[in-house]
């Protein structure tokens, strides 16, 4: 599946497309969204979208100009493809793909890492409108400071968690397509330092048994948006840093509708693995 060649032109170069930014709840209440089916009488989320046309720059050919510490994203090339090829069975993904992701992070995270904890993954398939995890077309950051620290405490014993929280903690997503180079619904990501702190709003992320927190993003002038055209699933990986306790670098991101895609363009399928990175 992963080695399937593209039969249609891959959109490349700078493009302008509408992105969906945060619009606050009309009643002034705190924003929330439900991860699964909301309780009876409640909406899935209580905030809206502000659609803004944004210029999105292609980093193809300029991959080495960006890094996690400065921009909160990094484009890795010349990566050897591992044993997992189908990305259908979650247990197989954990057994075969997780070790590849852990090794990748240990080798490429700036400043080094003492420990990697992979805590979940999401497979997205745009071809199935009924799928629970389609590409997300809303600008967001997966974690806030509060939810990042809660993640550490959720996955580790209390004494160990508190000790690790005294050092550097990062949350990094490893993203890749799984059905060939992306022809539709590419992923846009913003340069961390072009996003002002006042543009970021915490959102309650309500699971059936607990409440986490994500970050919504308002549009402000001066934001710098990018994408990486035609990512090769066999040899390229995109790192997206959602939290860094030392530098503060964090990357808003979203899938977007590329106006150059056609009905014949292959629907995007992708996987992101989320990692706690210590040290």
Image (cartoon, rainbow, N blue to C red):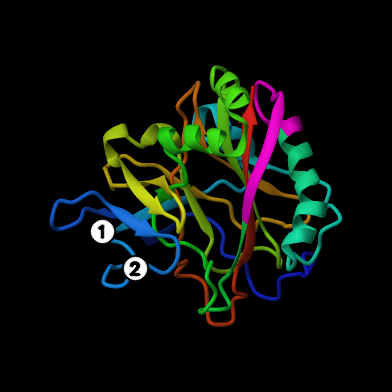
Front residue of 8/225: it is 225
Q: Is residue 52 left or right of residue 77?
A: left
Could you tell me which residue is drawn at 59 percent across and 76 percent down? 265
Within the magenta stretch, is there residue 108? yes
Could you tell me which residue is drawn at 54 percent across and 61 percent down? 186
Could you tell me which residue is drawn at 28 percent across and 40 percent down? 199
Front residue of 170/21: it is 170
Q: How many marks are shown on the rendered structure?
A: 2
Where's residue 49, x and y in %? Answer: 28, 60
Give the answer, above or below, for where 129 lies relative to 110: below
1 and 2 marks in contact (CB < 8 Å): no
- Quarter containing the C terminus: top right
Give the answer, above or below, for where 210 lies relative to 46: above
In the picture of the structure, the residue carrying the numbered disc 1 is 47
Q: Residues within 10 Å of mark 2 (few under 14, many from 20)?
A: few
Mark 1 or 2, nearer chain start = 2
Within the magenta stretch, is there residue 145? no
Where's residue 128, x and y in %? Answer: 56, 78
Q: Is residue 221 left or right of residue 94?
A: left
Residue 21 in view (yes/no): no
Q: Is residue 91 left or right of residue 182?
A: right
Please tell me the numbered disc located at residue 220.
none
Q: Residues within 10 Å of mark 1 (few under 14, many from 20)?
A: many
Could you tell me which residue is drawn at 56 percent across and 64 percent down? 11
Please tell me the numbered disc located at residue 39.
2
- Residue at far bottom of view: 263
Q: Which residues are magenta?
A: 106-121
- Real-space CA distance between mark 1 and mark 2, rounded to the nearest whole angstrom: 17 Å
Q: Quadrant of residue 54?
A: bottom left
């Amino acid at each position: 599946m992963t080695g399937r060649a593209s039969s249609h032109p891959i959109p490349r170069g700078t493009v302008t497309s509408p992105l969906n930014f945060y619009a606050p709840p009309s009643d002034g209440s705190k924003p929330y969204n439900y991860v699964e089916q909301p309780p009876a009488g409640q909406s899935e989320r209580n905030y809206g979208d502000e659609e803004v046309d944004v210029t999105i720059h292609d980093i193809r050919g300029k991959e080495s100009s960006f890094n996690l510490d400065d921009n909160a994203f990094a484009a890795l090339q010349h990566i050897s493809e591992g044993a997992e090829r189908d990305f259908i069975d979650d247990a197989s993904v954990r057994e075969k793909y997780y070790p590849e992701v852990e090794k990748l992070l240990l080798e490429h995270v700036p400043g080094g890492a003492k420990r990697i904890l992979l805590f979940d993954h999401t497979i997205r398939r745009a071809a199935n409108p009924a799928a629970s995890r389609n590409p997300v077309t809303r600008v967001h950051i997966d974690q806030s400071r509060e939810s990042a620290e809660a993640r550490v405490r959720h996955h580790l014993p209390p004494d160990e968690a508190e000790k690790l929280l005294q050092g550097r903690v990062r949350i990094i997503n490893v993203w890749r397509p799984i059905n060939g180079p992306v022809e539709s619904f590419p992923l846009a990501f913003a340069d961390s330092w072009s996003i002002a702190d006042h543009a970021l709003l915490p959102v309650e992320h309500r699971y059936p048994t607990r409440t986490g927190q994500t970050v919504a993003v308002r549009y402000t002038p001066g934001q710098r948006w990018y994408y990486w055209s035609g990512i090769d699933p066999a040899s390229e990986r995109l790192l997206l840093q959602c939290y860094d306790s030392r530098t503060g670098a964090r990357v808003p991101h979203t899938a977007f509708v590329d106006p150059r895609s056609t009905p014949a363009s292959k629907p995007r399928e992708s996987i992101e693995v989320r990692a706690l990175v210590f040290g």
